[in-house]
Every structure is written in structure tokens, then in C-alpha cells.
Amino acid sequence: MNSPLSSKNLRVFSKSVACKCLVLVGIALFYRALLLSYSPRNALSNSLLFRARHMSDSSSTGGIRPDKFLEVPQIVWGLNNQKIAFARACLTARMMNRTLLMPSLSASLFYKEVDKLRPIPFDKVFQFERFNSLCSGFVRLARFSDVRNRAQVFDLEKGSGRRWTVERDLEHLKQSARNESIDEFEVIRVIGKNPFLWHDHWPVEDYAMVFECMVVVDEISREADKVVKKIREAGEAERAKLESKTEIPGPIPFVAVHMRIEIDWMIHCKKLEQRKKVSEICSSKREIMERVGNISGLKTPTVLYLAVADTLLEEKEEDSSVLKGWRDGLIPFEKKKLGVKEEIYGKYSYLIQSAIDYEVCLRADVFVGNSFSTFSSLIVLERTQKARRLGFMSSCKDGENKWRSYAYNLAGESKGVPRRWMTNMTHSSLQAISYGSNSVSCSSG
């Protein structure tokens, strides 16, 4: 018969053995898990786990990975075509959850002779840091110096031509975004002929957000300020002439008119009218003058700033012909008459000149343009955004809307009046405005 002391010792001994066994089992399980984590079968799952953790860690950038990049070729054509192509590159990078490497724009317009294009860095036209601040969490830009490994880059060919349809382009991008072997590369480089000029996959509101983040550099803004100041001073000079005859309350209105009447445009628009079987694209100088003169609510005198091609300012006459024939009370000025053609615009390349003119037109009390012009269309888009922020969703009955715009190539509610124009922000793609339309209204959707 065992004594109480012997039974107690046995129980203690049994507990000690059980604890040791549990410790050994725990150690064995730990090493088994460690070995399994290095097995080839689990390599992919570990990689996906790391990627998921990394994406959650990058929440400060809104899910856009700061260490994975998309590189695109130099962007070409006119200022606003370049803005659209840049926005498409940004939105493509967003689709692939990548940061866009800051692309080069084109200072010149030799779009058919690529070897003559003069590249200009994005940050020489638009503010780099401001862009990332305003677009934080939506899209993101980086400099090439942020890339750690430039040796291993994946070339992603983006097709073009008639066979490369919108649907095919979108599916190609989606497949590339899902391809894990491609995603492992730090840099994906898009190659192809002007890959972001054509196909469109994003709603107007996405483009509008990118455009709002594209704030011009201070130098361009200051030059636009000088031009606007000259226009305002011209208005005050007209006021001074009329003070003895009439009392004009408030500031003299400033209306910007984007006149597309140069020869190359007229040839292009006539062909476009034939192809689209419409007759509302081209506008003669006489038609523009008539419709602008019939805009209701304009005080007189009103200063007109005519944004026209420089070729129309190189006539032998003392005054350019675009200045003649306007209704009484409309005082027209262009770069040459304002004295800014050489003093301000002449110092810069084509792209910077366009950016200055864009800013001047954007700041006008009233803007009048052509609905088939990309320049006019993007100005109206931005003015629509500004009006919406003030609570104006429509300009149909609001004649005093600060940001009101008109399309002079489209007839308004009565004969001889231009159509009121706001961008429909509900469009599923930018194509309706980037390539021109005769279907515009006074509502933003």
C-alpha cells in the first residue's frame, strides 16, 4: 500500500512529464510551420499575403502603391490633347494600382515629325507637389529618381490602329493588371505610338478630377495675370471715354471668344461636317460676331478678348480683320492690340503660350467657344466644375451665372443666339467632348 507521500510525488512527476511533452510538441509544430513556409507550394500564397499587407500599409496614399510605377512615352499634340493623354495615363496607372512616373510633354507642335518634338518636363508647366496634394488618394506622380531598379523593366505594348478597338484596349489593360508575373516588376513601361491619344475608358468625372489637380506653375499664372490686367485696363479706358454720356455700374465685363476661323481649321471642319453629316461645326467670322453680339445680359461697353491663332495677327493691315465688324458696345482686343503678343507670349514655346491663353479664357466673365474644339471643351469643363461648386447645376435660366459659357457654332433658343453650354458630367467617357459634339446643353447632368 502506497503512502500519501509517495502518491503525491507520483502526481508531481506525472505533471512534469506532461508539461515537457507539451513543450516538445509546441517546438515541433513551430519548426514544421517554419519549414513549410519555405516550401515552393506556399511561395505564391506568401507573396500574395505580403502584397495584401503592403497594400494595407500604403493606405496613406489611398491604395496607390508608391513603390510600383508606370512609365509612359512622351506626350504629344496640342496642349489640351496632351492634358487628356496625361489624364488617361494617370487613370491607367490607377487601374494598375501604380504610381505614374512624371512624363514629358511636348513644347512644340510638330506632331507628325516626332524627331522634331521638343520635350518639356511636366513640372515646367504644372505644379508637381500641388498635383499630388490635390489628387491624394486618387492618382499619384513620382520622379524617376524614386525608382530603385531601372535595370529590370517590363515593356507593355499598347496597340493602335483600326484593329485595336476600345474593347480590345480595355481588355488588354485589365489582363495586364491581373497578371501577377508582370506585377512583380517595379516599373511597367508602356510602349507604342502615342498610346494615350485615342482610347477612352473612364467617366468624365474622373478626368475632371485629374484636370483640377493640374495647376499651372506660378510663372504661367503670373503671365496670365498680366494679360487679364491689360484686358481690364482696356475696359476701364473705355469706361473713361463714356463717363460723360452714361453711368456704367460695376466693372466692365470681360468676354473671351475662342475664334476658330484659320484656314487649316476650316478645311478640317468642312471635312468633319461631311463625314458626320452635320452642318454645325464650322462658323464664319460673320456668324461668330452675330451670335456673340446677341448674348443676352451683356452690359455695354463689353471688352472682348479674341483668342485667335497668331497667323490671323500677321496681316499687313494696321488692325487685324478679326477686330472689325463687331456690334456697337463690344470692344475687341487680341494679343497684338493689347501689346502682349511679343512682350508676353513671344517669350515662350507653343505649349506655354497655349497654357497662358487657356488661363486667360478660363478667368473670363463669359466664355464663348466652338463645341468641336478640344481647347474650348476643356475650358467649359473646368468652368462647369467651378459653377457646380457655387451651386449652379444649370445655366438655362441663370443669365448672371459667373461661369456661364456658350457654343457659337450651335444655335441657341432663338435665331442668332449661341447655345448655352455646360459639360454633362454624367457621361461615361470623355469622347463626347474631347473629339467634339453638337449635342451640348445648359445642364451639367
Image (cartoon, rainbow, N blue to C red):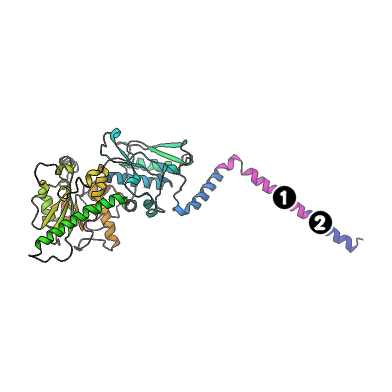
Residue 353 in view here = yes
Quarter in which the C terminus is drawn: bottom left
Tell which of 237 and 313 is nearer to you. 237
Give the extent of the magenta segment.
18-43
- Using residue 257 as the reference point, say whether residue 73 is left or right of it: right
Q: Left or right of 350: which side holds 296?
A: left
User: For the residues marked 2 and 1, what is the alpha-carbon distance in whole angstroms?
Assistant: 17 Å
User: Residue 14, labelled with which disc?
Assistant: 2
Tell me where residue 209 appears, x and y as whole percent: 34, 53
Q: Is residue 404 magenta?
A: no
**Which of the 4 image quarters holds residue 342?**
top left
Looking at the picture, which amino acid does disc 1 mark? Val
Which of the marked residues, 2 or 1, is nearer the chain's N terminus?
2
Element marked by disc 1: helix
Amino acid type, mark 2: Ser
Q: Position of residue 386 (x, y in %)?
A: 28, 58
Q: Is residue 422 above or below residue 342?
A: below
The residue tagged 1 is 25
The spot of residue 431 in percent (x, y) is 28, 47
